[in-house]
Image: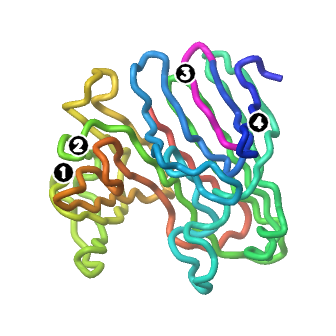
């Protein structure tokens, strides 16, 4: 096995892949293929945020890091009894491959285990592969292959949480001139004219967008004042903020996180679809 990784069995029954190479440290839960920790060794602070109240239990999603939403995002389109954001983040995955790359980064390849719970919620035959590269940057690629005889509909997303100083210090750039749909404004549309700052509730889906940047001028370390999010062209950035007098962060009522994710709309899958995200 690759010397930069260890598989750890926790007391709660969950398994984790711990990664420690010359460039970064990180951790991936085999339940959900969930990256819940990543920090480049050039940084003093973690990049991904984890809730102190996160519950590490079988069948429960982890609050923080990069949950994988698949094969639907949000509510199931026809059956409200199914869990929000799909089942991928609570289903066991297994390690297929681990490789130490020439640049010092570590690549691991995971596949979802087709359990009985999976086949009850998605009757089509498929293969789901997640490739994760942990280094000075964090790279994720989710590959869906349709193994059945007819197309089926999926949606997916990276439900990512970032560690920040305070929501009031945050500016999101790169979405200028992008078309958006605003859920707060009764799904009205518009064009983003300037960098995004957060003073009120905010919930927009962006199209025709480029790479995005989370800028935090008050962060207490210089190396993560600007975080770059590079996504594949098929993914749509979503920015969501729930802010009140007692809420000073995006999505979570503490001054420690920003909530940002990218996803494609529901679409018909005939063969193979790739969805990539690069954080640096």
Disc 3 crowd, CA 10 A, few/some/many (<14, 14-19, 20+): many
Considering every residue shown, the one lying at the far top of the view is 22
Quarter holding the N terminus is top right
Q: Give me the residue at 41% from left, 20% from top.
A: 43
Q: Which one is in front, 83 or 137?
A: 83
Q: Are marks 3 and 4 in contact (CB under 8 Å)?
A: no
- At 53% across and 47% down in the image, what residue appears? 66
Mark 1 or mark 2: whose residue is earlier in sequence: 2
Of the numbered discs 2 and 3, the one sitting upstream in the chain is: 3
Kindly identify which residue carries mark 1: 197
Q: Which residues are magenta?
A: 21-29
Mark 1: few/some/many CA within 10 Å (<14, 14-19, 20+): some
In whole angstroms, how far apart are the C-alphas of marks 1 and 4? 41 Å
Marks 2 and 3, Cα distance to the nearest angstrom?
Answer: 25 Å
Q: Is residue 49 left or right of residue 2?
A: left
The spot of residue 166 in percent (x, y) is 24, 41
- Mark closest to the chain's N terminus, 1 or 3: 3
Q: Report how far apart the C-alphas of labels 4 and 2 lie in the structure.
A: 37 Å
Magenta: main secondary structure equals strand
The dot on residue 9 is: 4
Q: Which residue is mark 2?
A: 170
Q: Residues within 10 Å of mark 2 (few under 14, many from 20)?
A: many
Mark 4 / mark 2, whichever is N-terminal: 4
Above or below 51: residue 148: below
Residue at x 83%, y 63% (from the top left corner): 115
> Which of pointers 3 and 4 lies earlier in the amino acid sequence?
4
């Amino acid at each position: 096995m690759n010397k930069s990784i260890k598989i750890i069995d926790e007391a709660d029954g969950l398994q984790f892949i711990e990664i420690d190479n010359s460039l970064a440290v990180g951790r991936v839960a085999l339940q959900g293929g969930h990256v819940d920790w990543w920090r480049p060794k050039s940084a003093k602070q973690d990049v991904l945020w984890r809730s102190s109240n996160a519950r590490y239990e079988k069948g429960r999603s982890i609050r923080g890091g990069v949950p994988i939403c698949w094969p639907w995002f949000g509510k199931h389109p026809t059956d409200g009894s199914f869990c929000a954001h799909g089942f991928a983040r609570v289903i066991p995955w297994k390690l297929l491959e681990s490789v130490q790359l020439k640049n010092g980064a570590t690549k691991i390849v995971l596949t979802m285990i087709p359990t009985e719970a999976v086949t009850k919620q998605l009757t089509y035959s498929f293969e789901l592969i997640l490739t994760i590269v942990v280094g000075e940057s964090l790279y994720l690629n989710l590959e869906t292959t349709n193994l059945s005889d007819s197309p089926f509909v999926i949606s997916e997303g990276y439900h990512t949480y970032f560690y920040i100083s305070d929501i009031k210090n945050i500016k999101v750039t790169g979405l200028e001139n992008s078309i958006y749909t605003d859920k707060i404004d009764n799904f009205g549309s518009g064009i983003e004219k300037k960098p995004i700052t957060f003073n009120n509730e905010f919930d927009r889906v962006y199209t025709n967008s480029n790479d995005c940047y989370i800028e935090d001028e008050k962060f207490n370390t210089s190396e993560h004042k600007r975080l770059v999010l590079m996504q594949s062209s098929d993914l749509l950035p979503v920015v969501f903020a729930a802010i009140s007098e007692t809420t000073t962060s995006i999505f979570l009522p503490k001054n420690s996180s920003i909530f940002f994710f990218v996803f494609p709309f529901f679409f018909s899958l005939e063969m193979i679809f790739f969805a990539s995200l690069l954080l640096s």
